[in-house]
Structure formats: structure tokens, C-alpha cells
Image (cartoon, rainbow, N blue to C red):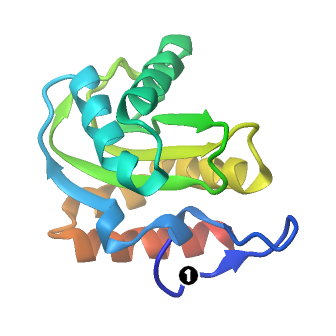
Amino acid sequence: LAGNHMMSTRNVGVRVPATIGDLMTRQTVITNLRATSKPQLLAELAGRAMPATKIDRLQIFRALLDREAVVSTGLGMGAAIPNARFKGLRTPFALFIRLAWPIDYNALDGRPVDLLRLLLGPDPANDAYLNILVSASRALRDPTVRDRLRSGADPRTVFADLGESAATQSS
């Protein structure tokens, strides 16, 4: 959580992110990621989340697979929000991913997925995590936001789109 992001200071003075935009930095925006299957993608995301969360890659991967076994996090419209919660994780962590090409994700509408927001949060879930999950879902359900994210030429453009989307969603 680097940078000058606005943070909520509720909950005993612990600074926690207030919106999905608070979690987005240039380092947490990944474009043109290549994956050929959902398990391969989730393993890659687990590996990328490990350094920031200090949670073992295999533990993240298993938690994501377990969550997908309950119900797919593929929202439809080519978007998904893989998510999991962990005891000991104090603040939410997120990545935005635009795949190089869509993959089968077992989404609710059956369409392949190319836009994802990985969200890892504390267990039990706190208000910040739940608000960020709702914000991410709203943004990815918006066709204008999806179109802009898909047309983003580089991570800076995508980051600008995410920040603007988060500001719009929280107002």
C-alpha cells in the first residue's frame, strides 16, 4: 500500500483501504498476462500476491481454488473477481489483470474472461474488504469501465481508468 492513497482510519487507528482504487498502484496492474487455463491463471496470481501478503503461494492458490469450487467468481461479461480470505491478513490486497487473450473461466454467463480483479482479505471479513468487493463488482459490471479497461494501452492508462472508476463508484 504505497503512495499517497486515501485510507480509512476506522477500527482502532489501523489504516485500511477504503476503496478498490486505494489498493491499485502501477505494480498491482498487470496487462497482457498470458494464461491458458483457470488453474494456471490462479497459480500465477497466487505467486504475484505472495510477496505483498507474506502468505504462502500454495496457500493462496488452494484458497482461490476452494472459493471457485463453491461458485465461480466469473461475473459474466468477460470479467471475474477471484477472492479469498486469510486469518492474519490485516488489510485487503488486490491486483487488476487484463489477460492477453480470454480464457474459459466457467463464468456465470459461460463467456471467457479477460478482465480480473484479484482480491485477498482478512478472515473474518471486515467492512473495508466487503466494501472493496462491492466496488470491484460494480466497476466490472459497468460496460463503459470494461470497454475502457480493455482498450488501455499500458499499465498507466489502466491505472488511470481504475482510479477514475473507483472515484465514480465511491461518490
Which residue appears at 20% of the width and 62% of the height? 151
Count the labels in the image: 1
Image vertical order of residue 13 relative to residue 77, above or below:
below
42 and 115: which one is in front? 42
The image shows residue 78 at horizontal and vertical percentages of 32, 37
Which residue appears at 55% of the width and 71% of the height? 22
The image shows residue 157 at horizontal and vertical percentages of 26, 75
42 and 117: which one is in front? 42
Mark 1 highlights which residue?
A: 5
Residue 56 is left or right of residue 133, and the answer is left
Q: Which image quarter: residue 30?
A: bottom left
Q: Residue furthest bottom?
A: 4
Using a 10 Å C-alpha cutoff, classify the residue at mark 1 as few (fewer than 14 neighbours), some (14 to 19) or many (20 or more). some
The image shows residue 102 at horizontal and vertical percentages of 19, 35
Residue 104 visible in the picture: no
Image vertical order of residue 154 relative to residue 89, above or below:
below
Residue 13 visible in the picture: yes
Q: Residue furthest top?
A: 69
Placement of the C terminus among the 4 image quadrants: bottom right
Residue 168 is left or right of residue 90, and the answer is left
Amino acid type for the residue under numbered disc 1: His
Image vertical order of residue 163 relative to residue 47, above or below:
below
The image shows residue 40 at horizontal and vertical percentages of 21, 26
Which residue appears at 20% of the width and 22% of the height? 37
Q: At numbered mark 1, what does the secondary structure look like: helix, strand or loop?
A: loop
